[in-house]
Amino acid sequence: MKKVVLSLLAACAFVVSGQAQWSPKGDKIKTQWTENLDPTNVLPEYPRPGLTRSDWQNLNGEWDYAIRPKGEAEPAVYDGKILVPFAVESSLSGVQKEVGADNELWYKREFTVPSAWRKGDILLHFGAVDWKADVFVNDILIGSHQGGYTPFYFNIAPYLKSGKQTLTVRVWDPSENGFQPRGKQTSNPESIWYTAVTGIWQTVWLEPVHSTHVTAIKAIPDIDHNVVNVTVNASCGQPGTVVAVELLDEGKSVAQAKGVPGKALRLGMDNPELWEPANPRLYEMRVTLTQNGKTVDEVGSYTAFRKISTSRDADGIMRLCLNNKPLFQYGPLDQGWWPDGLYTAPTDEALRFDIVKTKEWGFNMIRKHVKVEPARWYYHCDKEGILVWQDMPSGDMGNQWAPRTYGDGTDKARTPESIQNYYQEWKEIMDLCISNPSVVVWVPFNEAWGQFDTEEVVAWTEAYDPSRVVNSASGGNHRACGDILDLHNYPAPEMYLFDPARVNVLGEYGGIGLPIEDHLWWNKRNWGYIQFKNSDEVTAEYIKYAKQLKQLVKRGFSAAVYTQTTDVEGEVNGLMTYDRKVIKINEAKVKAINQEVIRSMTE
C-alpha cells in the first residue's frame, strides 16, 4: 500500500547531527521491541484495515508537549519533545510524567499537505486520545472529542493555509476523579490498578478524500441464508449517489450488490467457507461510491461468514455455539498493557505477539478486559482466528451499586451526564468492532464496577447489535437479562450458581503467580492469587485447575477465562512476564490440557 512520505523538513526534525534525540525514559523493564523502535518511523502500518485507501500520511513521531494547569491558555514555550502515539506517562513517550485531573496536556507539531490533496477534503484522524481532546489547526479550534478508546476525525481542508500547517491538541483526563470509562487506570497504582494513561495513544494520520466519500462499513453475516449484509455510510447522500459492494474470493468476484448509502445490501454466495478458529477464512470486499455515474471513492475492506449463538444441548443445557455447533470458548484474560508503552504496543509485531502466543497455548478465545485495542489488533484476531469477548472499560466506580444511599443519606447514583457519556462511548466501541468476525461477545459491565441500569443497558446493547451474544455482568451483581450468567472464582474453578435459562460461564479464575527476578515492574509489591516458585509448579497447578474445569464443563460451563495473559505492573499471575521475555509455563503441556478442556464439551 502506497503511503505519502513525510516532508524532508519534518523527517529531519527527528535528527540532529545524525543522532535521534528520543530515548525511552526510566529504568523499568521493557520489551524486546523497544530496542528496535525507530522514532522516525513509529507504527507505520495502515491503522484502519477494515476501510482502506491508498493515499495517507502518518503523523506519528516527535511532537512538542507541555503540561499546564487546567484552564490556562496555550503555553508560549513548550516543555520538550514527546513521541506520539505513546501516553505521556509511558517510557516510550520519552517523557514519563504524570498529568492529573488539575492539569491539561498540550501537543504541537507542524506538517505539510501534498499539493495533489488540495482538490478535496482532507481528514485528520486520531486513533484514540484519552480522554477529552480539543483540536486546533492553524490556531483555529476545529473540533473536540470526548472518549478515550475510539477513533475520531475532522475535515481540516477549510482551515489550511499555504506552506506549513500547525496542529495543536489540548487534552484533559481526570482518571479516577471523573465519571468517564477508564478501565484499570489510576493515579495511585497498586494491586490490580495500573498507571494512568493520558493523551494520544494511537496513530495520528491524514488522508485525502472526495467531498462525497465512504465514512463507515458495517458487515454482518447471516450464514443461515449464505449472505452477508453490508451497510455503507457516506459523507453525503445527494441524489445520484450509488454504493457498489463486491465480494472477492482470492481476487475473483463472487457477489455484487448496489444501493444507496445507509441501506443494507445483501450479498450471497453458494456454500461460503465459514470463519472459525481452526480456519479463519476471510473474504475481501471492494466498495465503490459513484455520483451521477462518476467514481468518487473506492475503498477496500473484508468480511467473513460466521455465526455466534446459543442453543440447548441434548441434556437441556444452554451452550455457546459457533456456526450452529457447540464450541467451548476458552482463553485468557487479556489486559493489553505494556511496560514500555502502557496502553500502546511498541510495534505492530508486538501487538500481534500476544494473540499468536494465545493460539499457540491451545486457547481459542481472548477476553479483552476493560480496555479497547487499536483497529489493527482486531484485524490480527480476525486473521489469526481467535474469538474475542469485548469488555466495556469500567468507570464511575464510586457508584457501583447505584442507586446507593451513603452515610449522609444522599443518593449518589450516576448523573445524567455520566449515563449519556457511557452510552456514547459504548456505542463508539461497538461501532469500532461491529464488522470484526472475531468479536463474538459484548460485556457491558465487570464485577459491578460502575454498574447501573443493567436491564436497560443490556436491552440497548442487544438492540444495537442483535448478531452477537451479550454477557450482561461478568462476575457479579447479576440480573436476569442478557445471554450469559458469568461467575468469577479464584484461584480454582467453581460453579456456585447455575442458570437453566442462560449460558453459564466462568468469566475469571486462576491467577497463579510466579515472580521472575529481573522481569518485575516492582521489586517488593508483587502479588498473585496464589504463588509458586518455579515453572514446573505453575504448570502443575494450571493443569490441576484445568482438570477440575473439565468436570464443570459437563455440569454446564460453556466458556472459561484464565487470569491472565501477562504479568501487569504489580500482578505476577501472567502466563508470561510483563516484558514478554519469559514464558512461565510448559507450553506443550498447557496446550494439550487446554485442547482437552475445549473438546470435553462435545465428547
Image (spheres, grey):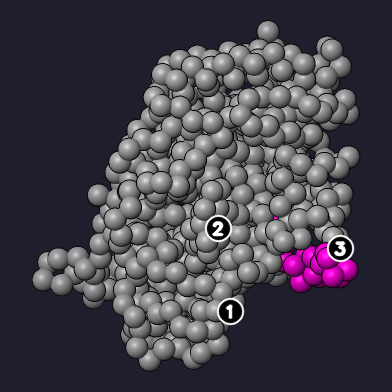
What residue is disc 2 on? 185
Q: Earlier in the sequence, mark 2 or mark 1?
A: 1
Residue sitting at 55 percent across and 87 percent down? Answer: 71
Residue sitting at 60 percent across and 38 percent down? Answer: 367
Element class at badge 1: strand
Residue 441 badge = none
Q: How crowded is mark 1: few (under 14 residues within 10 Å), some or many (20 or more)?
A: some
432 or 589, which is in the foreground?
589
Residue 405 badge = 3
Task: Count how many numbered circles sit on residues in the image.
Answer: 3
| Position of 561 relative to 136 (above/below) | above
| Position of 359 relative to 452 (above/below) | above
What residue is disc 1 on? 143
Estimate the x, y position of residue 477 in percent, counting from the top left: 80, 44
Magenta stretch bounds:
406-426
Q: Which amino acid does label 2 sit on?
A: Gln
Q: Which of marks 3 and 1 is nearer the N terminus?
A: 1
Give the residue furthest to the top. Answer: 603
Residue sitting at 69 percent across and 66 percent down? Answer: 179
The image quarter in which residue 243 lies: bottom right
**Label 3 vs label 2, nearer the camera:** 3
The image quarter in which residue 352 lies: top left
Q: Which amino acid does label 3 sit on?
A: Thr
